Image (cartoon, rainbow, N blue to C red):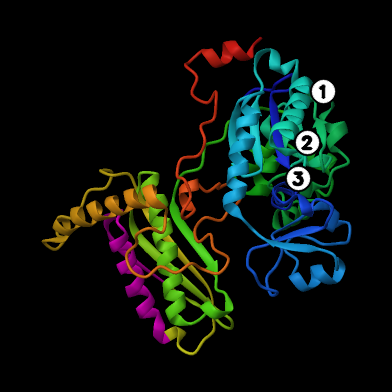
Amino acid sequence: MRKPTGIESLYVDFDAFFANAEKLLRPELRDRPVGVIPLPSEYTSLIACCYQSRLSGVKRGMSVSEARELCPDITLVLARHDEYVRLHHRILEEIDNHVPVKRVWSVDEMECELTGTEQQRYLKIAHALRDGLAKNVGAVLSPSIGLGPNQFLAKVAAEMEKPAGLTVLHPDTLLQQLAPLELSDLPGIAGSMRRRLEAAGITTMTQLWHTSPKQARQIWGSVEGERIWLQLHGYAVSKPGPTRRMFGHSRVLAKDWQSPAKARECLRLLTAKAAQRLRREGYNASAIEISVSVSEGAGWSGAEHFSPARDDHTFLSAVSRLFDSAQPALRGRKLQNVYVMLHRISRPGEVTGDLFEQAGVHDREPRWDQITDVMDELNRRYGGGAISLGIRNELPGGYAGAKIAFGRVPSLEDFDGLPVNPPERPGRSLPAGKASSDRSG
């Protein structure tokens, strides 16, 4: 832990990314208020909206009917996650032309570390980056750029002046700049956390600033409170990276997919998608869980455990057995949402098998592993839907298992029928020492 005296982090946060991506890809939309929806339905909600529509009061999460009432001229377009991921890779290539990307936080948020003379040239780098993105990716995709002594404060800065902002939080003036903000403007302070702060008598940013690290730890109930306090005061704090614990997907069932037969089909497709990701990242799973929510009352959930596996046959068979066992509880009820999770994750060879397993279990596993590997290769070569175990129908709205979420940018392999290798990013594999010498000048 140390306290930087200059600007060491540059954070890029794109404004209304999905909606502006549609305006970039469809020029006829550029002068119109635009909202993005996940399904071709009048009963869904907006997952994004442009700033022009926000002037009429439209917000993300608003129902289609509410959005149309507030903004009759709004154009609603179906989300195209594959196009957004392609734009994401173009953005990363352009950012790398100016400063290496240290970490991708989401499809539209990236963190860059400034080293050497970059710490004195931070404004020139930020302006050049913004100009490069406008020229080589598209001016419609406006980024807000934040600069600060650490990633936490650079992210806060990027949110302070939207859209198309460029804000610097300098170590020498932190309290003066942060004091006007609301507590909820800080990452990690949402509704429940804000209520805990208020219960402790902290309602303003200045009051939070003048707490102690020990008091922050007590309020948060964990070391995370102390980390936030230190980062708020400009310290560079290392934080353990996330540990992979599961691979899962969920889906809200469209109206004509709420029957048990269709819900089963949806679960199988989501399971196959989760299994693809599991194999691509080099893991096995020894447990699977499914849950089904219904319109009224409690839903159903169940789990099954097995020897560490990676093949579709093991997972799909388990899902079918679980769903069959759920039928008595679900009979006659309106199904709304299904969820599948592969967990008890391990690397091959990390888990010792059970000495008392039935004979023959391991004899079957290599065969299904080999079949799965052949299927994966064919799907890589000819598109993700080329071959599958059982019937495979596309879900309404598409993108089963390939939707963008905060903290996860799908691989292009997650999208059926698309090329599997994303474009190479120049400068990402420089020999040790070269990157720092090139950047210091």
Q: Mark 1 to mark 2: distance in Å?
A: 15 Å
- Could you tell me residue 424's position as x and y percent? 51, 32
- The mark closer to the camera, 1 or 2, is 2
184 and 125: which one is in front? 125
The mark that comes first in sequence, 1 or 2, is 2
Q: Which mark is residue 400?
A: none
Residues at circles 2 and 3 in contact by the CB criterion of under 8 Å: no
- Could you tell me residue 199's position as x and y percent? 77, 55
User: Is residue 343 on the magenta stretch?
Assistant: no
Which SS class for mark 1?
helix
Amino acid tagged 2: Ala
- The mark closer to the camera, 1 or 3, is 3
Which SS class for mark 2?
helix
Which residue sits at x=69%, y=12%? Answer: 117
- Could you tell me residue 42's position as x and y percent? 70, 74
Q: Which residues are magenta?
A: 302-328
Which SS class for mark 3?
loop
- Could you tell me residue 353's position as x and y percent? 20, 52
